[in-house]
Image (cartoon, grey):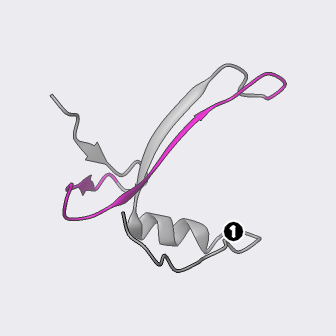
Amino acid sequence: MKQEKCCNMCGKKIVEKQEDCLEVQKEWGYFSEEDRKGYRFCICENCFQELVIRFAIPVEMYEQTELI
């Protein structure tokens, strides 16, 4: 059974085929404070927009010409 996706920031349920989300998975390597730990989370579009406006260096944004 497929697990329901929810935004880790706001808790909103992500309804597949109706909306999209950012999914991140990171496994930290040696020489970091997070050595050998793995993280996985999902962020809805609204929370993504709130997050990136707080970056000190703006994100690079580009238009996609082909959708897969």
For residue 19, above or below residue 66: above
Residue located 76% across and 70% down the image? 56
Q: Is residue 37 left or right of residue 63?
A: right
Q: Quadrant of residue 54?
A: bottom right
From this view, report whether residue 67 is shown above or below residue 30: below
Question: Which residue position holds label 1?
Answer: 55
Pick the front one: 66 or 13:
66
Mark 1 surroundings within 10 Å by alpha-carbon count, few (fewer than 14), some (14 through 19), many (20 or more): few
Q: Among all residues in the image, which is located at the extreme left?
A: 1
Q: Which residues are magenta?
A: 11-32
Query: Which residue is nearer to you in this view: 2 or 46?
Result: 2
Task: Name the residue rendered at 40%, 67% in the picture.
Answer: 45
Element at badge 1?
loop
Most foreground residue, 15 or 68: 68
Q: Is 28 colored magenta in this rendering?
A: yes
State which quarter of the image contains the C terminus.
bottom left
Residue 63: % across, % down: 52, 80
Quadrant of the image occupied by residue 46: bottom left
Q: Position of residue 4 (x, y in %)?
A: 22, 41
Q: Looking at the picture, how far across and down is residue 8, in whole percent? A: 41, 48
Please say whether residue 41 is one of the residues in the magenta stretch: no
Provide residue 53's location: percent of width, then percent of height.
Answer: 61, 75
Amino acid type, mark 1: Phe
**Relative height, residue 62 to residue 52 (above, below):** below
Which residue is at 19% across, 56% downward?
15
Q: Vertical placement of 7 versus 51: above or below?
A: above
